[in-house]
């Protein structure tokens, strides 16, 4: 048994039973409900399998994704990702933590959360599976230094949230958008505290990032905007919005880009 393994599983169990904030990413929010035993068991099982696989990978930081809602009609498999990183537990072992951006349910705002693997998967998922890519060693080192820094890790956080925020816009910021903008910050050692989202987006463009394109018609857009505070389309350029092209940051597009850009050279690993 590896050092800290039992502690890791115990921490997962505690996190699951203690519950999580009323915040989500990648899907609309509903009224809080009591957790079903099957939901807890499925989340715990997925978290434990992910813990074991991450330990076996030898990685220090991974881009970890989950399937929070069914996006198959848009050709997408996963809805949300965060940065999972290995942290010493001070007792000769380690734990895995996830830094991610989550939307406060029923509002147009979001915040950054640092959670365990159990909490990451305890979100009434569409499919109980995980996927990740392992960044190259130098990228991991730079990400790890930033993720451990409380102030720097939230430097690019923008409170105003839309689930489908425009990839090159500044009015809103969705969860995956914050994550790759934060990657840009980590990869720019010369960045100071004045370095912001415009600079991050410039870096992403230079590295060839291409957003996901969702084909969302006018009636769907109108219905979503009227019924959900966490969905807005008014930051998208008119010529794209009125041609039903919604360009936003998707997990699938980031997976593809990181490998193509040479930022990650390991294949996506999926757990079912």
Image (spheres, helix red, strand yellow):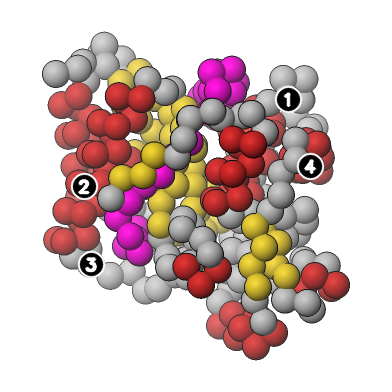
Q: Residue at x 42, y 65 (%)?
A: 69
- The residue mark sitting in front, 4 or 2, is 4
Q: Which residue is mark 1?
A: 188
Question: Around disc 3, counting alpha carbons within 10 Å, would you say few (fewer than 14), some (14 to 19), or many (20 or more)?
Answer: few
- Residues at discs 3 and 1 in contact (Cβ within 8 Å): no
Residue 161 screen position, x and y as percent? 62, 60
Q: Earlier in the sequence, mark 3 or mark 1?
A: 3
**Disc 2 element:** helix
Q: Is residue 133 placed above or below 57 in the rendered structure?
A: below
- Residues at discs 2 and 3 in contact (Cβ within 8 Å): no
Q: Earlier in the sequence, mark 1 or mark 4?
A: 1
Report the span colored magenta.
Answer: 121-150
| 103, 82: nearer the viewer | 82
Q: For residue 165, which quarter of the picture? A: bottom right
Q: Residue 141 in magenta? A: yes
Residue 121 screen position, x and y as percent? 33, 50
Q: Which residue is mark 2?
A: 44
């Amino acid at each position: 048994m590896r050092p800290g393994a039992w502690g890791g599983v115990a921490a997962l169990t505690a996190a699951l039973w203690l519950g999580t904030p009323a915040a989500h990413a990648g899907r609309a929010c509903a009224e809080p409900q009591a957790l079903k035993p099957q939901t807890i068991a499925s989340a715990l099982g997925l978290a434990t399998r992910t813990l074991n696989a991450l330990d076996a990978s030898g990685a220090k930081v991974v881009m970890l994704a989950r399937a929070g809602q069914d996006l198959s009609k848009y050709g997408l498999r996963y809805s949300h990702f965060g940065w999972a990183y290995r942290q010493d537990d001070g007792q000769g072992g380690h734990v895995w933590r996830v830094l991610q951006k989550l939307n406060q349910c029923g509002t147009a705002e979001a915040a950054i959360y640092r959670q365990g693997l159990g909490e990451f998967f305890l979100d009434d998922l569409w499919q109980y599976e995980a996927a990740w890519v392992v960044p190259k060693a130098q990228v991991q080192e730079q990400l790890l230094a930033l993720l451990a820094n409380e102030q720097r890790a939230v430097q690019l956080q923008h409170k105003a949230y839309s689930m489908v925020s425009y990839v090159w816009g500044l009015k809103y910021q969705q969860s995956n958008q914050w994550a790759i903008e934060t990657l840009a910050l980590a990869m720019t050692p010369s960045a100071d505290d004045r370095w912001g989202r415009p600079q991050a987006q410039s870096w992403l463009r230079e590295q060839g990032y291409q957003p996901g394109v969702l084909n969302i018609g006018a009636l769907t857009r109108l219905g979503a905007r009227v019924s959900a505070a966490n969905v807005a389309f008014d930051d998208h350029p008119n010529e794209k919005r009125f041609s039903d092209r919604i360009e936003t940051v998707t997990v699938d597009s980031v997976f593809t880009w990181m490998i193509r850009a040479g930022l990650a050279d390991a294949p996506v690993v999926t757990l079912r």
